[in-house]
Structures are given as structure tokens and as C-alpha cells.
Amino acid sequence: AAPGYMLEAVYVEGGDHAPGVSIFRCSTSKICPGGGVGVCAEGREGIACARCRDGLAMSTDGTCEPCDGRQIAIAVGGSLLVLALLTFVYFRSRRSLERLARGSLNLMLTSAQMFAALQTLSV
């Protein structure tokens, strides 16, 4: 396959014919260097080389690097920050019924934004 594409063998269970080949377009040629069936950049796997292998995490440049404590620290720190923020919003919104409704909305929006940020960081 050309750089930026990945070939994957497709086997049909119970079939008596030769396996086929599917072609997948990768997000960048950096993760799919091209070549034979199933060839991905070092540390990558899956359809279109989209995942890092177990024990590896995607870095900002798209390469897969060994996991270290940094990812865990970001996840724990982010979770604690969200918990503190939710606690603050909850107690702040308990003052009146109107503020409670507004606080609940703020709580849901803040939670959604934090989860989106954590997913973007791939934590």
C-alpha cells in the first residue's frame, strides 16, 4: 500500500475461497508508512493503525510512547479539579430554588466540558 493507507486481510469464516484485502485510509502517512498487509508505524495497531498498542499512549505528535506517570497524574488531577468544581457549584446553588436550577445547568455543562477535555487529551 502507498503511504497513508493500510491493507488488512479479510477472512470469511466457513468460506472456501481465498481471503480478500481491505484498504483503509489513515489519518496521516506518519502512522501508516505503507507496505504489505497489516503494516503500521512502530507501536500502532488496528484498522487504519488508529490505536497505540497496550502499554503505549499517543503523544501530541501522533507517535506512540511508553506510558508514564504523567498521564495518570493528568487524569487524577483533572478528576479532582472536576470534583472540587462540582462541589463548589452544588453548595453555591443551594441558596434558592431559582439558583438551584441554574446551578444544575452549570453543573451539567461544566461536567460535559470537562469530560470532553479529558477525551481530547486521551486520558
Image: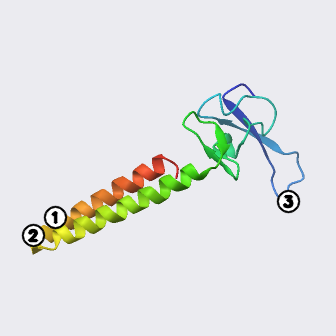
Q: Position of residue 29 (x, y in %)?
A: 65, 28
In the drawing, does residue 15 fall left or right of residue 88? right
- Classify 117 as above or below 94: above
Residue placed farthest to the top in the image?
A: 2
Q: Nearer the viewer, residue 42 or 80?
A: 80
**Which residue shows up at 88% across the image and 45% down it?**
18
Residue 111 image-quadrant placement: bottom left
- Classify 5 as above or below 71: above
Mark 2 vs mark 1, CA separation in Å: 6 Å
Q: Position of residue 33 (x, y in %)?
A: 72, 28
**Which residue shows up at 17% across the image and 69% down it?**
93
**Which element type, helix, strand or loop, lies under badge 1?**
helix
Q: Earlier in the sequence, mark 3 or mark 2?
A: 3
- Classify 123 as above or below 35: below
Residue 58 image-quadrant placement: top right
Q: Nearer the viewer, residue 36 or 63?
A: 63
Residue type of the residue flagged with mark 3: Gly
What residue is shown with label 2? 98
In the drawing, does residue 43 fall left or right of residue 77? right
What residue is shown with label 1? 102
Mark 1 vs mark 3, CA separation in Å: 59 Å
**Which residue shows up at 30% across the image and 61% down it?**
85
In the drawing, does residue 5 fall left or right of residue 12? left
**Which element type, helix, strand or loop, lies under badge 2?**
helix
**Which element type, helix, strand or loop, lies under badge 3?**
loop
Q: Position of residue 107 (x, y in %)?
A: 27, 63
What residue is shown with label 3? 14
Residues at circles 3 and 2 in contact by the CB criterion of under 8 Å:
no
Residue type of the residue flagged with mark 1: Arg
